[in-house]
Structure formats: C-alpha cells, structure tokens
Amino acid sequence: MDSYKSYFKFQESAFSVAPDHKFFFFSHSAAEALNHVRYGIYESLGFTLIRGEPGTGKTMLLRYFLSKSGEDLLTTHISDPRLSGKELLLAVLASLGMSRFPDDDLTERKLVQQLYDRLLSAHRQSKKVVIFLDEAQGLDFESLEGLRLLSNLETNNQKLIQIVLFGQTELEEKLQERRLRQLDQRILVRYHLLPLEPEEIQPYIQHQLTVAKIDSCVEFDLQSINKIYEISGGLPRMVNVLCERAMMSAFVENTRKINVGNILEGWESLNGIKILERTRV
C-alpha cells in the first residue's frame, strides 16, 4: 500500500469514506442544505431537519458546519441516537460546561431545570445552544418526544435551544406517525439533501484530489467520469469508493490516466462479478 501511495504522491487518501470536513464539496444541494441549517438556527425556529439517502454526505455536512461555527454557537454533537433522555440532557449540559453533579441532582426534572438556567445564561450572552443529532432515524419514540419537550424551553419570544436532525428518509416516515404529530408540526425547516448532479462529478473528483495534494498528472477521462455517475447515481460515498478502486486498478497497470476500464474493474472488485462489456480506452 505504501508503494500505491507513493506512486500517486498521496499525502492522504483523496477518496476516503470517512467524513473528514476538509474534503467538504459545495455541490448545489449541499450549499442549499447549509443555508437551511443556518436559517433554522439563526432565526431560532426550534427544529431543523436535513434528510437524505445513505451516502449523500449528511454527516460530512454536519461536521463541516461544526468546523465553521463561531463562538456565538454552543454546540452538542450527538452521533449515537440510542441515548436515553437523561443521557441526552447530560451531554447537552456537559457541552455547556457542567460535567459534575451531586448524586441527588441526577433526576431528569432537576437536570432540565439546570439546563434551563444554563440556556438563560447563554441567551443573556447572545449565544445560541444547538443540538446536532446524526443518524436521527434511529431515535425511538421516547427520545423524539424528549426532544419535543426540550424545545419547550423558551423565553416569551424565543426558543432557547435549537435542534438539528440529520437522518435518512425513514425519519420522515416515522414523523408521520400519529403519536409524533406534535413534533412533526414543530419542524419548520426541512431540506432533502440530493446526490451530486452529473456535471458535478468531475469538479468533485478534482476537488478531492486537490485537497489531498495528489500530483496533478492523475486524470480521469470523460468516459470514466460518465461511468462513475452511471454506477454511483451521484452518491458521494459511492463516487469515493469507485475512484479509490479505479486508482488501484490504474496503479496495477502502471498508469495515472484513469479510464472507463479502470472504473469497471473497480466495480467488479466491489461486487465480485465479471463485467463482460469492459473496454479499454
């Protein structure tokens, strides 16, 4: 693998599936999603929902936003949707500087009161408290209802806590359940994150290569770009996987010019099948 990295002059992998925010790409849909998140938070609307299919880059978008957030935001990032109501309260309080509690203060009622006091203090300092929940489709009814109750913490004219949900499309289906009607009605900002458009594939790939500081002689030809979109449907995660496999194929062939044959070979390696139509360009 070291020879593979040195061959392409990697400083780091350009096509990792790990959501490293410095590789965030401003596709049209990702930019729109960011605008919706900002709007929901800074207008103090309570709930914002960003939904999308697996692999569209929801976690990447979340981490990019967190990396750019200023001192006016006090943020909590919850990546495990299985937290109980009390665990969620403790996580938010910890982000606000409270990590030690007397044993008799650990009832949920007392934790909510302490949270309210902290939220008021943040409000007086013109700071917004924001909870970001990733993989929110995994939240059960009790957790979702707990979030709704947290959103009741407010002044006479403003919500004291902003909640941003990132989840797969099943979350929207879950919110249609009758027992979650009140929560569904409170989500005033919603956006569906879409895959990359066909014309965004080439700029996306070039962006990844540039950020990773890979030698400029690496080149994906037009047919390979078109095949990547055809196979991936524009899902950034799948684009990354295909590009990584295609570059490995090119390395074996001792070339830095990626063609459609390399893409198909990479696709074969992922699926354990032989594609008979493969051609070399």
Image (cartoon, rainbow, N blue to C red):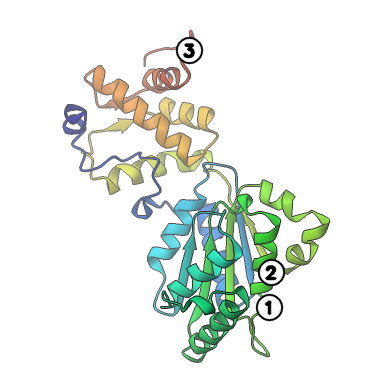
Would you say 230 lies left or right of 21 here?
right
Q: Which residue is mark 2?
A: 148
- Residue 106 visible in the shown view: yes
Name the residue located 43 percent from the left edge and 78 percent from the top edge.
98
Q: Quadrant of residue 147?
A: bottom right
Task: Check the image and name the residue furthest to the right.
Answer: 178
**SS assignment at label 1:** loop
Would you say 272 lies left or right of 186 here?
left
Vertical position of residue 216 compared to residue 179: above or below: above
Name the residue located 24 percent from the left edge and 42 percent from the top edge.
12
- Could you tell which of marks 2 and 3 lies nearer the N-terminus? 2
Mark 2 or 3, closer to the camera? 2
Quarter of the image containing the C terminus?
A: top left
**SS assignment at label 2:** helix
Q: Which residue is mark 1?
A: 152
Q: Which residue is mark 3?
A: 273
